[in-house]
Image: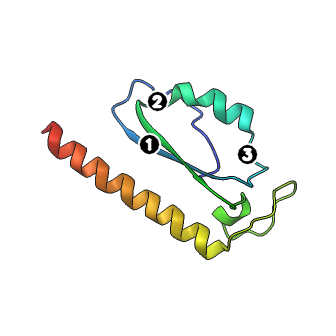
């Protein structure tokens, strides 16, 4: 979350979820966008409106980060919902393939 794949996963049969906040100013967007070609075909993105980088952990404010316009709890809830949705869809997809 708020990061990107360092290795090439494009040939892997994986589901992947990229979650980041619209106010995340720590995430290097150029590197992030450049790394998308290394993702598996079933990768998807989830941008959380109003979220910043610091809310993905409980380590405090991050230098250069944007100001969040949602609460940490709202960010964590939306991230959890996206992860559950991914898990459910991946399970359904696995059943269809078997």
Q: Are marks 1 and 2 in contact (CB under 8 Å)?
A: yes
First of labels 1, 2 by sequence position: 2
Q: Do the residues labelled 1 and 3 touch (CB within 8 Å)?
A: no
Looking at this view, is 18 or 59 the one in front? 18
Answer above or below: position of 48 versus 36. Answer: below
Disc 1 is placed on an element classified as strand
Of circles 3 and 2, which is in front? 3
According to the image, label 3 marks what residue?
27
Question: Mark 2 packing: few (<14 Cα in 10 Å), some, or many (20+)?
Answer: some
Question: Mark 1 packing: few (<14 Cα in 10 Å), some, or many (20+)?
Answer: some
What's the CA distance linking mark 1 and mark 3? 18 Å
According to the image, label 2 marks what residue?
9
According to the image, label 1 marks what residue?
16
Q: Residue 85 carries which label?
A: none
First of labels 1, 3 by sequence position: 1
First of labels 3, 2 by sequence position: 2
Residue occupying image coordinates x 73% and y 32%: 30
When asked about the image quadrant of residue 43, the answer is top left
Disc 3 is placed on an element classified as loop
């Amino acid at each position: 979350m708020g990061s990107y794949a360092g290795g090439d996963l494009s040939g892997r049969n994986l589901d992947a979820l990229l979650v980041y906040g619209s106010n995340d100013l720590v995430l290097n967007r150029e590197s992030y966008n450049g790394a998308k070609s290394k993702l598996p075909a079933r990768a998807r993105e989830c941008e959380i409106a109003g979220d910043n980088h610091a809310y993905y952990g409980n380590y405090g404010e991050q230098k250069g980060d944007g100001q969040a316009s949602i609460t940490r709890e709202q960010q964590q809830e939306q991230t959890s919902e996206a992860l559950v949705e991914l898990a459910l869809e991946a399970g359904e997809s696995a059943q269809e393939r078997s």
